[in-house]
Amino acid sequence: MAGTREGAIAAARRLFDDGTYLAHLRRLVAVPTESQMPERLPDLRRYCTDTLPSVMKGMGFAIRLLENPSAGRGPAMLASRIEDPALPTVLVYGHGDVVRGLAGRWAEGRDPWAVGEAGERWYGRGTVDNKGQHLIAIEALRAVIAERGRLGFNAKVFVETGEEVGSPGLRAMLRRDRALLAADVFIGLDGPRQTTFMPELKLGARGGVAFDLVVRLREHAHHSGHWGGVLTDPGFILAHAMASIVTPNGSIRVKGWLPERVPESVLQACRGIVFEDIPNLPEADPDWGEPGLSKAEKIFAWTSVIVLAQITGHPDAPTNAVQPEARARLQVRHTVDIAGEAVIPALRAHLDAEGFPMVEVVPVMERDAFGASRTDPADPWVGMVAASMARTANRAPNVIPNSSGSNPSNIFMEELGTPVIWVPNSYAGCNQHGPDEHALAPLLREGLGLMAGIWWDIGAGAAPGRR
């Protein structure tokens, strides 16, 4: 049974058109896999032991449960189809956990655990983040098997259940089960695209470092009439310290926070990125950030810092008093060109040099942090996948050097030594993480065709050599 590339793509799209994909998506979304809530651990297990395996039944995959080394955290499902150890092996990634459903806050009384159709929008928690997206990869594998009679490569579908809380235990799991998870390339489906009209690949992620700036000067507040102008005001001290971090136009002044050099392959990829203006989303402010950089370079090749929150006194009930303390939480996003562990020491040195030794820098670790990562845009696997997508879509994809946000790419690159490629199938207006999360049906259908083309081409011998 030989089949054709066009036949595989058509078969993948038929799975959408005949309702198979939607029926399977409904089953996945119905499981409330909120990983932030300890009481959902049984649902996380059920997703890996029953729900997702039942969707993959009959596809020729051997399925096993991988327990999480971190106590009280959700497991992972590994489904493996090894056709020939000499063939390339692809590790397909997804995450079955979701953020809180926020039931009662969705428009028109929508149930977050049921897929609701409204024209081209399919509502439900996980429709894009991430159940609907790893389902695209699975259904496209199904289509290729049906058309060719085999894949022509080895596939390992790995779905974890802790991504939304920083993937606790993932690194230890990869170390423990390295032989089971060994692969030549990692391909994951997650996140939004820059446009709705062209395909896209992303090659890693920026890292995130959060910290508090704290000015503690005394134990209690003191009457503003008696002590104003004589006691040092922590609010102003903090404001001046924060102002020293960036210029009035948002250019970063902290030595050690900025890349000394951005690789030419990354700059070249940035020059080719196409953006789309999405209704109800803000425009980039052209005069904010590093002068001389394009929007793409600022987002994907540079460092950013923002103020998440700032407080002194009691804003909800101000009192006439000199306050004892001021506090702000900041977040730095950085590329792989900056070491995440150097961010806070560099800030400490900067504040001391600027005359603010009294400002404490307190690291924040509310969840396991994802580090920065990036597959070189010139990697042969990137070229192969991009060429496949261009052939299917009749236009070259956006190639994003790394996601602007965070994901576990670095863990897989460091522990398994694989290049990491993401193929997103959502868009910026999808309300990911909020009420009314939704997928666009045309992007889901398009994604099925794109992934079927990628799987077909890998099986046809287009993949680079084994690692």
Image: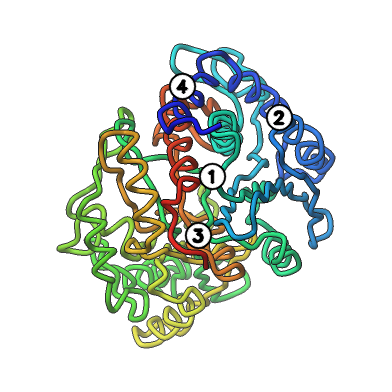
Classify mark 1: helix, strand or loop.
loop
Q: CA distance from mark 2 to mark 4?
A: 20 Å
Amino acid type at mark 1: Asp
Q: Which residue is mark 1?
A: 316
Q: Earlier in the sequence, mark 2 or mark 3?
A: 2
Image coords of residue 92 (percent x, y):
58, 48
Does residue 359 lie above or below 374 as drawn? below
Q: CA distance from mark 2 to mark 3?
A: 53 Å
Q: CA distance from mark 3 to mark 4?
A: 47 Å
Amino acid type at mark 2: Val
The foreground one among 447 and 322 is 447
Q: CA distance from mark 3 to mark 1?
A: 11 Å
Does residue 232 appear anywhere in the picture? yes
The answer to which image quadrant residue 34 occupies is top right
Q: Are marks 2 and 3 in contact (CB under 8 Å)?
A: no
**Left/right of residue 69 with respect to residue 164 in the rendered view:** right
Q: Residues within 10 Å of mark 1 (few under 14, many from 20)?
A: few
Q: Which residue is mark 2?
A: 55
Numbered badge on residue 441 = 4
Does residue 434 appear anywhere in the picture? no
Classify mark 3: helix, strand or loop.
strand
Q: Are marks 2 and 1 in contact (CB under 8 Å)?
A: no
Question: Is the image coloured rainbow, by chain, by secondary structure, or in one colour?
Answer: rainbow
Residue at point 72%, 42% (across, down):
61
Q: Which residue is mark 3?
A: 312
Q: Earlier in the sequence, mark 3 or mark 4?
A: 3
